[in-house]
Each structure stands twice: as C-alpha cells, then as structure tokens.
Amino acid sequence: MKQLLSKYFQDKDIQQLIGKQLRVGVIVSSIIVFVGGIIYLVRHGHEHPSYGDFTGVREGLTNLPGIWQGVLENKGMNIIQLGIVLLIATPIIRIAFSVIAFLIEKDYLYVVITLMVLGVIVYSMLGGLAG
Amino acid sequence: MTILSFTLILLCGAFTAGLLGSLTGLGGGVVIIPLLTLVFHVDIRYAIGTALVASIATSSGSASAYVKEGITNIRLGMFLEIATTTGAVVGALIAVYMPTNVVAIIFGLVLIFSSLMSFRKKMEIPEGEEKSRLASQLRLNNSYPTAGGVVNYDVRHVPGGYFMMTFAGVMSGLLGIGSGALKVLAMDNIMRIPFKVSTTTSNFMIGVTAAASAVVYLQRGYIAPGLCMPVVLGVLAGAFAGSKLLTRANVKWLRIVFSVVIGFLALQMIYNGITGKL
C-alpha cells in the first residue's frame, strides 16, 4: 500500500511539472512574439501585406542560425519567429521531460515509447524532409 | 490595406475564433484556415503553417490545466503519439505533392465531419466487453477524478485506435489542424475511453502532433511571422477569455450557430477547391 501511495504522489508531481512547463513555454513565447510584433509594426506597419502568392518566407526565417542572426540585428520578423520556434519547442521539451520522468519512475517501457516519439520528431527536424 | 490594419483586423478575427473555439469545444484552429484564405485571400500554404502554430499554442495552453487536474492519461497519450507524430510527418510529406485545391477540398470535408461530431451524443460505455491484454501490458488502463470520486476505466481495441490515430496524424500534418475530432473518435468510439479523458488526452497530444509537422513546414517557409503574430496572440487571448466565460455561457445555441458557420465555410472551401480558386 505504501508503495502504491508513493507511486501515486510521484505521478502527481510529474503531472504538476509537465503542466507548469507547458504554461511557461506558452507565456514566454507569446511575450517574445508580442515584442517582435511591436518592432515589426513600428517599422513595417505602413507597408502592404502580400500573402496572396506563395513564395515561401525569406531565407533567414527558415533555419535557427538565420533566425538568430536576425534577432541579434533586432529585426522584428526574426524576433517573432524566435517566439514561434520556442512555441513549437514547448511540446517537444515536454517529451524530453517525460523521458526523465519515466526514468525516475523506473518505467522503462515508457522510456522507450517516449524516446520513439522524440525520435520521430528529431527525424522530421533533421531528416531533410523540407524538400 | 496596410500591414498595421491587416494585423489588427486579423487579431480581432483570431480572438473571436479562439473564443468561440474554446466555448464550443471545437478548437480555434478550424476557422483560422478559412478565415485567412476566404476572407484575407492568403495562400493556403501560409494559412496551414499559421494554423499549425496556433493549434500548438491553444493545445499547450489548455493542456497545462488538465494535466494538473490529473484527468489526462499521460501514458495513453504518449503511446498514441507514436502514431500521430509518424502520421503527421507523412502528412507533411504528402502535402508537397498534393495540389492546393485538393488540400482545400479535403479540408472542407474534415471540417464538416468535425462540426457534425460536436452534436453526437456522448455514449455510455457497454459493460462486459472483452478486455484488451495489450492495454494492460502497456499499462493504459487508468482512473480519473470526478465529483463523485475516482472512476476507473479500461482501454479497449488498442490496434484499431492506434490505426485511427495514425490517420488523424496524417490529416493534421496535411491540413495544419489539430484534428481533435478524429482523435476523440479514435478514443471514444474505438478505444471506449470516458469522454472527459478522451477530450483532454486528445488536446494533450495535439501540440506534439502539430510540432512534428511544424518543424518540416518551418524549413519549407510556410510559417510566416507576419501572419503568426496576430493569429497566435489573438487565438490565445480568445481561448483564455473563453475558459473564463465557460461557466456562465449558454453553450448549446452557440455550438449550433458556430457549427452552421463552420459548415458554411467548409462548403465554400470545397467549392473554391473544385473551381480551382484556392
């Protein structure tokens, strides 16, 4: 019974942690998007939007080094994109957290399952699928 | 129209979408794509990228609350995420080769299905059905807290549910939506999971599923910061406002109205797809 109880509490702690991490991720990335948005609007607000024809966004916004380069130059678009990348990373970081959580619980079956999910995402990131 | 006014109008539109989506439980993402393509004449590829990011935002935001309450079945979610992420990557790959008007037609069909699903009666779980050995081996059976105490439940038909989840993942990767309706269908109707657990677990999975295809779309240049900024902020603010209002609003009529609107948008997407305007 004691063992059952301690397992229950561990589960609860992990849930609290995952919940908090998701919330922090969303809040931090929205703040970054908001700040970048203000800079972007101040500089480009008077221009005209053109999303009718698909050309893909400009070069520096499609990979991490490019995005970061623009952030250092205080470009609004790049700061927004940094926030978006952080938002996309939020559930991915949650997966990485869960691997550790299942390790602590000694639930090795779920360590493997979680690593498989992480593997699929890493493959889609680095597998050159952009075509 | 200047970028400033474009952004402000889009912000209001996204706020309304997030508000209605959270009040009716249909999710904000479903109206983002018709809003961008039909109203703002944005190319559907940019619209898909934007909607994906919006669905990650709303999923992660609301999942944090449910996970804390202990309703979400994390093991089940994690196991099925193998299916949805694999599907999502496949969907994102198919999207390159699929003509945009076909994407618009499929989108319309899924949209109609989703709005019909919201009217479906919540089923009682029949007793005495054969228990799944796979479910107990994978430790998927769990319990959740209700007002009347802790309720235990068993998960059934694991392979069938897994297959349906893969399909939901493909649709999510192809169309840029959370495809929550398909996920709930897999968990409710096939795996026989209580409604509350299936909706929260589906919501928990949407973020990871969308992230799997979003990393592909980001590299492909589908994710435009100028569109994502107002849409993400608007949808999040709307969903937050919706969660505060939820206890006081009469949702039944709102859901009917919203579903009719969604059905209408879906038909228009299909029409524009067939005539080749999208």
Image (cartoon, rainbow, N blue to C red):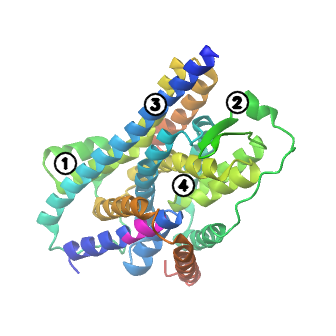
Instruction: Report the magenta residues as a range.
Output: B16-21
- Mark 3 touches mark 2? (CB < 8 Å): no
Magenta-span inclusion, residue A34: no
Relative to the observer, which residue lies in front, B39 or B156?
B156
Binning the other alpha carbons within 10 Å of mark 1 as few (below 14), some (14 to 19) or many (20 upward) gives some
Q: Nearer the viewer, mark 1 or mark 2?
A: 2
Magenta-span inclusion, residue B17: yes
On the same chain, marks 1 and 2? The answer is no
Residue B177: horizontal and vertical position, in percent?
51, 60
Name the residue type under label 2.
Leu
Residue A12: horizontal and vertical position, in percent?
50, 30
Q: Nearer the viewer, mark 3 or mark 2?
A: 2
* Residue ID for mark 4: B173
Q: CA distance from mark 1 to mark 4?
A: 28 Å
Relative to the observer, which residue lies in front, B117 or B216?
B117
| Image-based side of B25 in relation to B241, left or right | right
